[in-house]
Image (cartoon, rainbow, N blue to C red):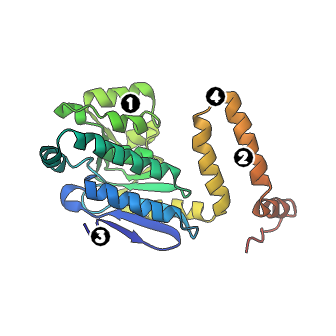
Amino acid sequence: MVGIVVQEGTEGVVTLTMSSPKNLNALSDEMIEALTGSLLRIGNDPKIRVVILRGEGKAFCAGHDLKQMTARKEERGDSYYADLFQRCAKMVLTLRDLPQPVIAQVHGVATAAGCQLVASCDLAVAADTTRFGVNGVNIGLFCSTPMVALSRNISRKKAFELLTTGEFLTAEEAETHGLINHAVPEAELATATRELAEKIAAKRGAVVKLGKEAFYKQLELPLDKAYAYTGDVMARNLALDDTQEGIAAFLEKRAPNWD
């Protein structure tokens, strides 16, 4: 589908818009393919510092496209499901492995795999009217793959409660539980997200890239190995010319010369 994901901007802060409002930007086969491709291209572009991910229309993303899933299962059999979730996993792992930070700009609803998408982004800003849920249990489908990202963002007991009751979180609750960074009035959503993106984009790209990679890797390590690994990262960071200039400028009480 042409234009199902629209990129605005070519450097600095770029916006990716999921543009399938009729099905609430569901993660159809086409949407997964388009998002994955866009992210891979962005990851290879050093001019891009930060990515904003948003949805067009009434919602951010309503999860997988159940109508399409049903039709494709009839065409291809049960193996279609395994293939679908492998492709979706590749998409969210591409999101995490992207050198640039990704900020979800969320409105309306983010449900099931849509909530997974928010949880997979590095940061999230949401309209205060947004609702979040992993509601598959309500139709007999436990949200097992969304559970992976969700349980790595919020507490185990709260995640399990949401997964087993199918209830929604408000934006205020999502902020309290750590699923999003900020809940703001809907009229201020785009501005607030852009301001956060520009703050990050103003930092040195090589340093943020190094830090993002280290952030996720150290989370997976035992404490002693995490310190050993991040010590090596700090040493590599200090060896960068930009870092040496930044330290010199700080000590000399002047602006760094990063031209």
The answer for how far apart the CA atoms under marks 1 and 4 are is: 23 Å
Inspect this view and state whether residue 194 appears: no
Q: Looking at the picture, which amino acid does disc 2 mark? A: Val
Q: Which residue lies furthest to the right in this view?
A: 252
245 horizontally vs 83: left or right: right
Tell which of 75 and 124 is nearer to you: 75
* Labels 1 and 3 touching (C-beta < 8 A): no
Q: Please give the residue where the numbered disc 4 appears in the rendered image.
A: 222
The answer for how far apart the CA atoms under marks 1 and 3 are is: 34 Å
> Which type of secondary structure does the marked residue at label 3 adopt?
loop
Q: Residues within 10 Å of mark 3 (few under 14, many from 20)?
A: few
Q: In which quarter of the image is residue 35?
A: bottom left
The answer to whether residue 243 is above or below residue 111 is: below
The answer for how far apart the CA atoms under marks 3 and 4 are is: 43 Å
Q: Please give the residue where the numbered disc 1 appears in the rendered image.
A: 159
Q: Where is residue 189 in the image (x, y as percent from the top left)?
A: 40, 59
Q: Looking at the picture, which amino acid does disc 3 mark? A: Gly
Tell which of 40 and 156 is nearer to you: 40
Q: Looking at the picture, which amino acid does disc 1 mark? A: Ala
Q: Please give the residue where the numbered disc 3 appears in the rendered image.
A: 3
Number of dots carrying numbers? 4
> Which type of secondary structure does the marked residue at label 4 adopt?
loop
The answer to whether residue 247 is above or below residue 45 is: above
Q: Please give the residue where the numbered disc 2 appears in the rendered image.
A: 233
Sequence-wise, the earlier of marks 2 and 3 is 3
The answer for how far apart the CA atoms under marks 2 and 1 are is: 32 Å
137 horizontally vs 100: left or right: left
Q: Looking at the picture, which amino acid does disc 4 mark? A: Pro
Q: Residues within 10 Å of mark 1 (few under 14, many from 20)?
A: some
